[in-house]
Image: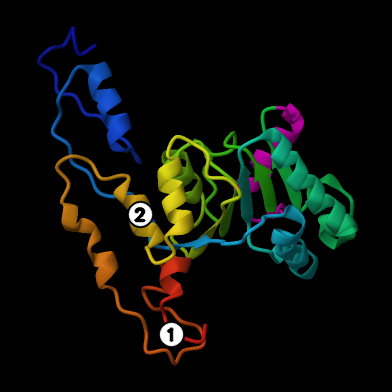
Amino acid sequence: MRGIFTKASSLGLSATINQKIKKEIDGILHWNPLTIAVLPDRPNIYLDVVHKPVYLISSDLKWITEGLKDQGNAFPKTIIFSQTKGSVNDIHAFLKRSLGVHAYHNQNKDQENRLVSKYHGSVSEDLQSWTLAQMVNPSSNLRVLVTTIAFGMGVGVSDVRTVIQWGGCKNMLAFWQQVGRAGRDGIQSQAIWYPKSTAGDDKELFDRIKSERDTCVRKVILSHFMLPGMDELCLDFLDDREACEGKCEDCQCAKCKCCSHCSAKCGCKA
């Protein structure tokens, strides 16, 4: 189209992009455009990296089954991402086995009362359709979805409060898009990463997040989305934030609302 309409203006748009993908797109389209970009930050999402020597579904995700038993369909809507169908099946089986009759609202084993579901390419079309409909319905009973990346792009669920990422991810772009499933309505939410694995295209970046506990998780991630021409100082504000005075029980300072690495530096009681 650009080869035919040579005098027409062209505009390319992307919600999230990094330098590698931009270079590929520029090459495919044979253009050198003026680039206007801002970092794809989601300040309303708290980033939690769980540091442990060993990661086990039965112990690390036990808090979800306890929460569902206690709160039922009042449990915050949660998506658990895992890379493989096998891992999704394992997590879903653990939740169902641990919950028993509590996997259903009011312990009523009717399909509409399911609190837990799974989603991947090998799941039946009926279950996929049901799960999609329930996730976008703010009044549904479905509280926890275990899924691969199959559930994501093009699916608008505004009230997800927690995104859990179990293990590795294909790359940082996919990781950040999964994080962005949380809090799309702007309300404070959280993304929890259990780095059972750091395998992927951006392994060095994931290893940094896992190992450098003195470094802001948000800053490391956002630096990956810097594009040529962007102001290198635009991330410095993350270093300039001050912690509270250490007297609050439920801290809402900039560090405590950022990530687990930053909140660990705050002297509050929260």
Crowding near pointer 1: few (<14 within 10 Å), some, many (20+)?
Answer: some
Disc sitting over residue 267 in the figure? 1
Q: Amino acid at mark 1?
A: Gly
Say whether residue 233 is magenta. Answer: no
Compared with residue 224, is residue 61 higher up or lower down, i.e. above or below?
A: below
Of label 2 and label 1, which has the lower sequence position? 2
Residue 185 shows in the view: no
Q: In front here: 218 or 33?
A: 218
Q: Which residue is mark 2?
A: 220
Identify the residue at image location x=31%, y=38%.
Answer: 18
Identify the residue at image location x=24%, y=48%.
Answer: 38
Label 2's element?
helix
Q: In front here: 246 or 103?
A: 246
Judged from this view, the residue extending furthest toward the bottom is 247
Cα–Cα gap, marks 2 and 1: 23 Å
The residues colored magenta run 122-143
Q: Are marks 2 and 1 in contact (CB under 8 Å)?
A: no
Q: Amino acid at mark 2?
A: Val
Identify the residue at image location x=67%, y=33%.
Answer: 120
Where, by quadrant of the figure, is residue 138 drawn? Answer: bottom right
Where, by quadrant of the figure, is residue 256 drawn? Answer: bottom left
Q: In front here: 117 or 18?
A: 18
> Measured from the top left, where is residue 270 in percent x and y?
52, 82
Q: With 33 as the anchor, is 241 left or right in this view?
A: right
